[in-house]
Amino acid sequence: MKTIITTLFLFAVTYGYNQNNLPEIKDLEHITFPSEQGVYYKDNNNLLNPFEGTYLYSNGNTSFKIVLEKKEMTTYNSGYFYEDLLVGGYQYIEEGTEKINTLNVLNTDHTNSTANYKIHANIIYRGNALWIEDATSSDEVWLDGTIKDPLSNSLHDLFLRKVTHNGQEALKILIMYGHTVREEGDPPKPPASYPNGEFILIKQ
């Protein structure tokens, strides 16, 4: 009898401990800034899923490839909070010359996704706002994120929107509002290796 009571007590303590240490779950669409400590911003409605895949823009000898994957419960700042995140890498070839290729980042499951993946996005908007003026409905989902260039240590805002282009599934992106990070006294960094502007990439 004593053994049974002890087992039940230990189960109750363990169960209570696990319950108390699980992060509070909030919907990713309502993520706050600054984000709350100990919260898991979960993509409850799978709004990031349609953006996954390989996309390609090509024009002659110039091409821009982006590969996107959804990562669940990624950590930020050693577990300060958790979030579902669309992450990725890219390759840019200009007039036959490869300027940059970060596709290999997807071969590693990084702990700090925002620091290590060269594309990340999970800020969700709907309908017409900012650069979207022709949304198909007020419920149309598009994403705000970041693209990084490790060669020049620069980053830009990256907006992503799923569209149909010439009957094909595609991704419309806008790269803008860039800046470069450098130490005081260092010479200016080279410009980003990827292009700025708006592109339509066909899903492969």
Image (spheres, rainbow, N blue to C red):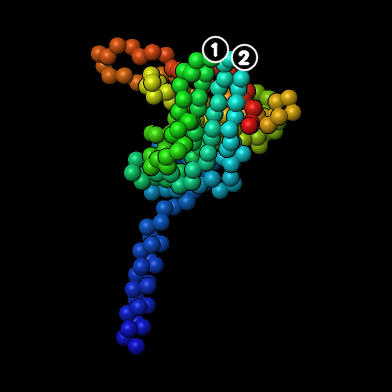
Q: Residues within 10 Å of mark 1 (few under 14, many from 20)?
A: few
- Residue 161 versus residue 139: which sits nearer the camera? 161
Query: Above or below — where is 14 with respect to 157?
Result: below
Is 176 on the left-hand or right-hand side of 110?
Answer: right
Q: Residue furthest front?
A: 96
Image quarter of the C terminus = top right
Helix, strand or loop for disc 1: loop
Tag 2: amino acid: Gly
Q: Which residue is outermost to the left?
A: 185
Disc 1 marks a residue whose amino acid type is: Glu
Residue 185 found in image quarter: top left
Task: Kindly state the secondary structure of the residue where label 2 is placed.
Answer: loop
Nearest to N terminus: mark 1 or mark 2: 2
* Residue 131 percent coordinates (x, y): 59, 22
Instruction: Please tell me how crowded label 2 is: few (under 14), some (14-19), or many (20+) other residues with Cα within 10 Å.
Output: few
Left or right position of 132 against 24: right
State the residue position of label 1. 95
